[in-house]
Amino acid sequence: MSAAPKPMPTFDVDAARADFDILSRTVYGKRLAYLDSGASAQKPRVVLDAMRDFASRDYANVHRGVHFLSGAATDAYEAARETVRKFMNAASVDEIVFTKGGTEAINLVSYAFLAPRIQPGDEIVLTVMEHHSNIVPWHFLRERQGAVLRWVDVRDDGSLDIEAFDAAITAKTKLVAVTHMSNVLGTVTPLKEIVARAHAKGVPVLADGCQGAVHEIVDVQALDIDFYALTGHKIYGPTGIGALYAKKAHLKAMCPFNGGGEMIREVSQDRITYADPPARFEAGTPPIIESVGLAAAMDYLNGFDRAAVAAHEHDLLAYARDAVRELNWLRVIGDAPGKGAILSFEAEGMHAHDLATILDREGVAVRAGHHCAQPLMERFAVVSTSRASFALYNTRTDVDQLVAALHKARQILV
Amino acid sequence: MDNSLRELYQEVILDHSRHPRHSGVLANATHKADGYNPLCGDRVTVYLALDEAGKVADIKFQGKGCAISQASASLMTDLLLGRSKEDAEKLMQGFLHLVKGEDAAGLSADDREILDVMSGLSEFPMRVKCATLAWHTFKSAVEGGEAAKTE
């Protein structure tokens, strides 16, 4: 008996584009080619509607009042937590902490998990392609507690050498902190393999999933990962909200982070006891409306065949890569096999900011600069690069517009 | 083609950025400062030799950055050579107004004519910092203060 052929994944990009009102606006009278979703993604109407509907019908503070609306808002907030749990396939909602973004999620691990466990000389392993948000919290531990940062290099194509990574994990290592997908190179790291190697030496692993969660399927149980941080605004959701997944045992062993309402069990004049996780780490009024928006965004994304979305994004990347291959004045940085839909490049005789200014006037929005990844810029000996990052709503027309604008920039600048 | 782009990247600007005047290290500098734009990573170092009267007897700069920042630094060194500290300060204020599209009445007609090539920047507010980095760095050098920063 032969298995039925798998149906071809389908993704209708034009239908998806119609979900994003902003994509139909013009800039400087030109069609908008938004190629900066790696910095922040646009929001589909369902996300904006969900937030407005919730705020205009069910809004109040959560976990506090006894009144009707407080109950409705609490239900919505906790339903959002369940959506995030499902999105990452965590075992329990108690393993999902809402934060104000990916940065706060990583800082939470640094402050509440790792700091109390660090002795001078202890090591934290990270890669040169980390975003500053997965660097600076560990620098704090270096500055304040004498931790040592062990940097794992990438190959010239931007790929990660797992053997070099393995060698960097020693008896002194207290944490591995690694991106799931580089925001500059697009490199997708072999998280499962990294976790296996680290766990073999008894070392927990944190993944910065701010890019990865958008483009890859995240299954924290299959990965057996200890911590996974994501942010809402890159995943078609609102700003001001993110989430940390952490294994229950870790969360239970973590000291409180911010102090305030909501995170306590009991407070008196001379003693205090803390709430169980995840409430212990959610001091103060949380981003309630944003939680509803984040859940709507995750539902929106999962409403598509994710494999088909990934195939669409990879097609765009391949199309763009081919288009710029012919331009001998353009150097692409990051060509790792299986990389995600990000194209960073340097153009001969054109500084990234001059280039981005000209592209902008052609309606093409790209990011120019060091991308909050200065150690990586140093590694590749560049001051700054231009970056086009693709989302589910981008098309080959966007790529064509980018390439035409690149030629225009060269006409003007070189 | 967008006219404001043509004006921003006009030939004079591109020429200055490709062939910067007074570029390099000044061995006999009496003053020096480093400027840094943390937003884009651009760097510039301004070297000055002030004479006893406080005149800019010599000036050089070294830097890496976009066409706007390099052209602005090059133009600045051209203009400041031979000026007194007070003149330089006035010139700088006029320049800062000019690139923001504000009233630059403090500039002399000659200076205004030379600096006019930078006036297109007023259409690109996000790039003004690129043009002012060298000037702020010059000011820190004169004042012997901390490294200049624009962001």
Image (cartoon, coloured by chain):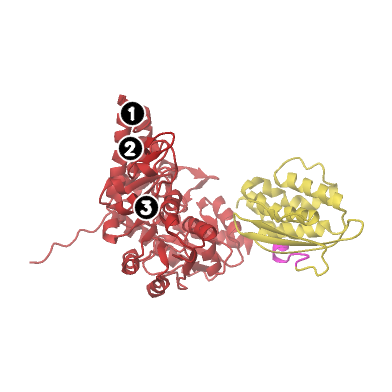
Chain colours: A red, B yellow
Foreground: A303 or A82? A82
The structure residue drawn at horizontal position 91% and vertical position 59%, both measured from the top left corner, is: B52
Q: Residues within 10 Å of mark 2 (few under 14, many from 20)?
A: many
- Residue A347 lies in quadrant: bottom right
Q: Of circles 3 and 2, which is in front? A: 2
Q: Position of residue B53 (x, y in %)?
A: 92, 56
Say what amino acid the circle numbered 1 marks.
Ser
Foreground: B119 or A123? A123
Say what amino acid the circle numbered 3 marks.
Leu
- Residue A193 lies in quadrant: bottom left
Q: Which residue is mark 1?
A: A70
Q: Which residue is mark 2?
A: A77
Say what amino acid the circle numbered 2 marks.
Tyr
Foreground: A272 or B91? A272
Q: Of circles 3 and 1, which is in front? A: 1
Element on which disc 2 rests: helix
Judged from this view, the residue extending furthest toward the right is B53
Stretch in magenta: B14-23
Q: Position of residue A331 (x, y in %)?
A: 52, 69
Q: CA distance from mark 3 to mark 1?
A: 36 Å
Q: Which residue is mark 3?
A: A392
Q: Position of residue A68 (x, y in %)?
A: 30, 25
Instruction: Please indicate whether residue A135 sits to the left or right of residue A395 in the image.
Output: right
Q: Position of residue A79 (x, y in %)?
A: 29, 39
